[in-house]
Image (tube, helix red, strand yellow):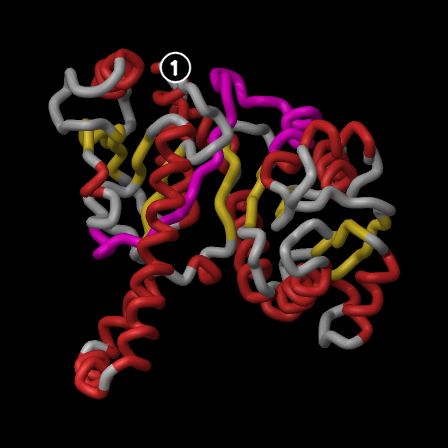
Amino acid sequence: MGSDFGPAELVRGAADLSLEAPQIHALVVGDRDAIGETLQETRHSGERISVYHAPSFVSMEEKPAEALALKPDSSISVAAQLVAEGEADALVTAGNTGAAILACARRFNLLPGVRRAALAAVYPTRRSHGEKADPFSLILDVGATVEASADDLVAFAVMGAAYAKVVSQNPNPTVALLSNGTEALKGPACVVEAHQKLQNLPGLRFAGNVEGVDIPKGTVDVIVCDGFVGNVCLKMLEGVHDTVMELAQYAYKSKLRWRAGLAMLSSGIRRLKEVTDWEQYGGAPVLGFDRIFIKAHGRSRARAIANAGKVAAKAVGADLSRRIMEGLPR
């Protein structure tokens, strides 16, 4: 209910999911009348969609803690409770990120050995490398844990690697710490300590430190940092894509010779649009809880929501939580 486009795109995404993925049942939580209105005009499989009424919702502008206190029957609170009680296997939302994380933190349990949950983000890279099939890599945390200890960073590394194995189907993902230099002693104390611990962690393909310049290159499959640094990097990546596309549109409209040049570069620009198309991966995982939680972008349309549902189902089917626990230090 709380996404930028309201419930309609979410419902259409669930409808698409009911037709494209018959193994998935979508439980749509929100205002029954608004949901029903969209379903009436959208092709779907009625056997694979259920509606659970929630009379209120948290908007993007509201402060998470205050909104959840004032609206205990909000759609995000009700959805998180349904997942906690086992009525559903995973939660997908495109609403207020802070409210969603807080609602889940109050109802889900952290995995043994995990002190803080991490919001991961899938980002486009220059190339796909190793054995993975897609051009995306993972960076975490990007906002859930602003200040992370060395042990938190180690847990983030394990969680990110497990997720890459499941979703990108990369059997041996490379993991690195984000720092201001590649040397082992570069960075704040928590990064230096995490580097030492990750070097000795069995079962993890640790590549050491990487710098900011390595993010778009796709040097590694998983980049680990605290939530403050990760959020800054994420916003920068989004800004680069938007700026490139705006400059291309400006150039196309301005001069004929620029338009001719852009025509020659059109295949490259299409490629950029393809690799930065976040709708094809649907959403980003919040890792560390004992339940699967996928946070879709607030601007998600139906296609992104359907893909987020498929990602959630893949994580459930692969028993992601168990795989994370197996990789954590004993």
Question: Quadrant of the image for the C terminus?
Answer: top left
Q: Quadrant of residue 17?
A: bottom right
Q: How many marks?
A: 1
In the displayed structure, does residue 77 sit left or right of residue 61? right
In the displayed structure, does residue 36 sit left or right of residue 322? right
Q: Quadrant of residue 187?
A: top left
Q: How would you rate the neighbour count of disc 1 (Cα within 10 Å): few for under 14, some for 14-19, many for 20 or more? A: some
| Residue under pointer 1 | 149
> Is residue 290 among what the camera can see?
yes
Q: Is residue 174 above or below residue 22?
A: above
The reply to whether the magenta stretch includes residue 109 is yes
Q: Is residue 195 above or below residue 99?
A: above
Name the amino acid type tagged 1: Ser
Residue at coordinates 34% horizontally, 40% vertically from top-left? 233
Q: Nearer the viewer, residue 244 or 33?
A: 244
Q: Position of residue 150 (x, y in %)?
A: 34, 15
Residue at coordinates 56% horizontally, 59% vertically from top-left? 300
Q: Position of residue 143 (x, y in %)?
A: 47, 33
Q: State which region is magenta.
A: 101-129
Q: Is residue 128 above or below residue 274?
A: above
